[in-house]
Image (tube, rainbow, N blue to C red):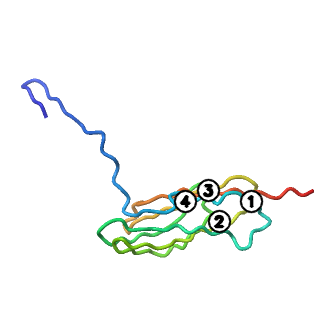
Amino acid sequence: VDATPDSYTWTVDTTQSPPQSPIEATPSTVDFGGFAYCPLDPSPVENVTLKNITTEPITVVPSVSGTDASSFSVPTDQITLAPGDTTGLPVTFTPSGAWGSRTASLELKDAGGNSVLTVPLAAAVKCPIEG
């Protein structure tokens, strides 16, 4: 702070980045691509690897949110990761309804309900052309 009797000048550092998530997800986005809906059995599953990148244990609860959340599913049990530990989280796409794209987000929240990581989910429903 630079002060004179009649004025003050404040300098604000706007270069700070937001806090880093304590969890790393691989892949950072999940795209199931296009699928024929007639129906698919079994529904396609993509595995997301979660890694605790902190020095403290962390417990998170996975869920799916967004416009087409009902088209995707994950186990909703709590996941506890020790520092440096990894685990796989299966994400299932269950196509239904009209043709077109589906989008949602895999959300990981801590015990206080705070979001610690969001992974975009995408897929498309397509039917084969009958001739």
- Which residue is at 69% across, 56% downward? 124
Spatial distance from mark 1 to mark 4, Cα to Cα? 18 Å
- 45 lies left or right of 48: right
Residue 34 position in % (x across, y down): 71, 57
Residue 54 position in % (x across, y down): 32, 66
Who comes first in sequence, dot 4 or dot 3? 4
- Which residue is at 30% across, 41% downward? 15
The residue indicated by pointer 1 is 97
Query: What is the crowding at mark 1: few (fewer than 14 residues within 10 Å), some, or many (at least 20)?
Result: few
Where disc 3 sits, the SS reads strand
Q: Amino acid at mark 3?
A: Ala
Q: Nearer the viewer, mark 1 or mark 3?
A: 3
Single out the residue that lies furthest toward the right. 131
For residue 122, which numbered disc appears in the image? 3
Who comes first in sequence, dot 2 or dot 4? 4
The residue indicated by pointer 4 is 65
The residue indicated by pointer 2 is 93
